[in-house]
Amino acid sequence: MNELLTAVRAGRHHDVPPLVLGLDLPGRRAALAGLKELRKEVRGWDWQRRDRVRKALLVAGAGCHAGAAGCAAWIGGRDLRDWARSPYPLILASLKDRDPAWLGDLAHRFAGRAALSDAEYTFVCELTRMAQVPLPASDNLVVGWTELVSAARWRGRTRRPLTDILREDPHSAVLAPRLFEMPELPPQVDFYDAPDARDNWPGALCALVEDGVLDRAHLVERCVVRLMRGGRSVDQRFFLAVLLRLGTTEEEEDRHLRDWAAMATDGITPVASHAQQVLVRLDARGVVPTRELADVSGAVLFRQEKKLVRAQLTLLGKALRRDASAAEELLPAVAEAFGHEGIDIQERSLKLVARYLAAVADPRVREQLASAAARLGPLHRETVTALFGGPAEEEAPEAYQEFLPPVPVLRRQQPAPGTVAELVEEVAARVKAHASEHWIPSSATMDPSAGVTGFERALDGLVRLARTDREELTESLREALAGVHFVEQGLSPYMIDPRSISTSHGLSVVVASLLGLVSDRDRTAWRAKTTVPKPDACAHAALNGVLLDRAWEAAEAMDIGEAPFLLATPTWHTGAIEAAELVERLRTYRELGARPGPADFGQALLRVRRGGGEGADVAAAAEALGTGEGDRLAAWIRADEPVAPVLRHPATAVSRAFAGNWWQRTTTEARQVLLATRERPVIRHEFPEAFHWLGLAQLPRARECYHWGPDRCSHWTATLPEDPETLAAWLMPNLLFAADQGQRGAAGFLPSLAESAGEVGGATHLALAYGLGARHPEDRTSAVDALLVLAAGGRLDGASLGRELAILVDRDLVKVNRTADALGTAAATGAYRTVLTVLAAMLPGLLAYEKTPRGLGDLLSVAAECAERCGTGGIPPIAGLAAMAGRKGSSQTARQAARLFATFPVGAAG
């Protein structure tokens, strides 16, 4: 036993199997007790020592366990899984004297554990071979199998065909059908939508069906069940691809009539389209009852996909031509298309109702159809009146009411945790959430305001408790953060680089210093890197540098133990500080004889709420403190100036609207619409060096950089909570690239910017315009949220936003169809009047082009929907609308222009 433990401590894993086999049962039991103690001890070692013994410890523990359950748990332990080469051959060698039944039990237990890799799949296969039992077809084992198959495809210099690999695999017949039972497909099961492609999983599985390895009827049934069940889009497309390759017989199609109907109603577009085609065949064979067809048609016609709606109207038209007596059941379903946004869909459905209305004898059905047709817009009013007659009595229209979100209210930030236990719990949660060096933020990671207020609470709490309970705090943090990367191996370069940090990294810097992991020399050298030396550096690095400088300063303050709390801790969730509260904090500092940190006080000044009737009194109270910081605060309040005043970029005039030709695409720099900011000398003269970039004059530059994300932008708006215009100007280049080049995530700060209490103007509206035209939907959603917040607070200038959008479209920086999608989303929330005001200012420039911009029809559709909902009273005439509405032809643009034109009083639409 001692020899085994000695070998494990030395990391001699190759010596472990013979030493284990040389022990009897009592010896193994005694050795296991020692190995468990060693495992606990190893967890406290540094990573290099742990790596040296980990594999030997894993093999020895597996070989010494008497029970299969304990052995499976030991092998699957997360703290024993970091190894460069597979340890499983050594584990098998240490288990070769076990009973076959015991090995089979181990195989089944281990196969049920999560996250099996290809090496673990091979391990289970070898166990079942030794035990002579069937392979346990668990979901986790299938994941390992697909990893092994994927690796085999790329082994060697050439890519091997997937079909050949599956044909050679002895377990394909058992594991491949399991793919159709799993909640989600493994990520290795890739495929291509090309119908003739065979070197993918659908093609290879169908080849196994042709070989007789897999049962075709079973796979067809499972594909139908999975398509009915729904799930991830990629999974749905996979099962649809398999089903299309296998094909379906008439008997199979007839048996699943209700399934096809459900897929056509609720499936993703490709699935619904296929189900609809099957329903067409079933209807042609007379299998679909009229009632069933009416039910499914009503649901399909409610969908937004025009192709599906048109196909369903065609199917209904065929059914009515075949049997006009079915009109009473089918026409109410046709009327569902009256609510579709497409003018051509509305017209087509109205014509279908008109053609077969004579076959409807039931007055209740006629009344139902007339009620549905009454919802059609003014463009169809004449046709509806001729078809159903005028209303018996003219109903007075209801007064329109705009629905906007509640006006954001300031939420007071919670105080810092008052006990060590509460603070350590909060700090550990924030640090561990982002401890991985390769962590990539999701667009929905967290509320930005929650990110910055949580950081500020934790930072303030660390400073407070480090002064009163440093020893207890240090020990508790060390215990709570055991195993975290920077605690074990030190701070990584990315955690101290202003280009890449987040609030959690700033917190990690403070914790590392508190735990004694940063030497004084390193702290000095690393803090020097927080300053952004070049004036042409991006704003993200400069704002991050401010946060990082504050973190290093807080770490130094904790070493000295003088600061009772932080001055820059926000009063409100936006990051703002009440000026009177800052005066009281400075008073407390003076009474305690504490010296404010330059970065802490500098950030506090940037956060002070400016303006208001009490400004003069608060400035006088600050000056009465008789300290340098009090005098600076008084001067800052009296100046009441933005950190960096914004200058309008001169090149903003529309340059192609009346030129008659599309703008020729040039470089982004030549087309850019960005803003400059004026210098603020007081920032460079009185603030720490890390703040100096903020006081420099900034020229507009189309600079591409990558420093954003939900967790990385939360502190930007909180750094300057009273200066949304300045921030919008500085962060504009990335919004430009989000719209023009498709960068993702750059608009995430817009909702927080809209909640800022400072004055908004041209820069904010231009930033909003870029966000509404961003390529990615999540960025457009952020811009829509910001638009609604500004509108709710009465701070949105719709006409200004519309003009900015027209300029960006003119310079080919945003796409019309993306803007239409964003504004349509905003309108759908109930903000029809707000959106119509924006569009009324945007449309004249677009209608003036000789060649119709792509997506203009969609934009006109949104405008028409808004006008029909809220009316056009008070909306100025839209130049060019009458000419577009009067164009001949049946284009979507002309139809939607006519629809919008019909909502204006005669002669008032421009």
Image (tube, rainbow, N blue to C red):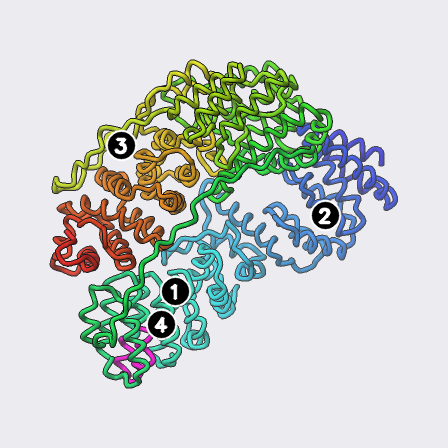
Q: State the CA–CA distance, disc 2 to disc 1.
A: 45 Å
Please tell me which of labels 3 and 4 falls first in the chain: 4
Q: Is residue 683 above or below residue 660?
A: above
Left or right side of 874 for 463: right
Q: Is residue 428 above or below residue 496?
A: below
Query: Dot 3: within a 10 Å radius of its alpha carbon, few (fewer than 14), some, or many (20 or more) residues?
Result: many
Q: Is disc 1 in contact with disc 3, using a CB cutoff of under 8 Å? A: no
Where does the image place residue 810, in percent across and percent down from the top left? 21, 40
Task: Give the quarter of the image for residue 344.
Answer: bottom left
Magenta portion: prevailing SS class: helix
Q: In percent of the image, x 55 and y 62: which residue is there?
A: 181
Taking the image as drawn, is residue 493 in sight? no
Q: Provide the residue designation for mark 2.
A: 73
Q: Secondary structure at mark 4?
A: helix
Q: State the CA–CA distance, disc 4 to disc 1.
A: 12 Å
Q: Which residues are magenta?
A: 317-334
Q: Secondary structure at mark 2?
A: helix
Left or right side of 217 for 100: right
Q: Residue furthest right?
A: 26
Q: Provide the residue designation for mark 1.
A: 272
Please tell me which of labels 1 and 3 falls first in the chain: 1
Specify the amino acid type for callout 3: Gln
User: Is 329 part of what is drawn in magenta?
Assistant: yes
Q: In percent of the image, x 64 and y 40: which residue is there?
A: 86
Please tell me which of labels 4 and 1 falls first in the chain: 1
Q: Provide the residue designation for mark 4.
A: 297
Left or right side of 150 for 798: left
Circle on res. 672:
3
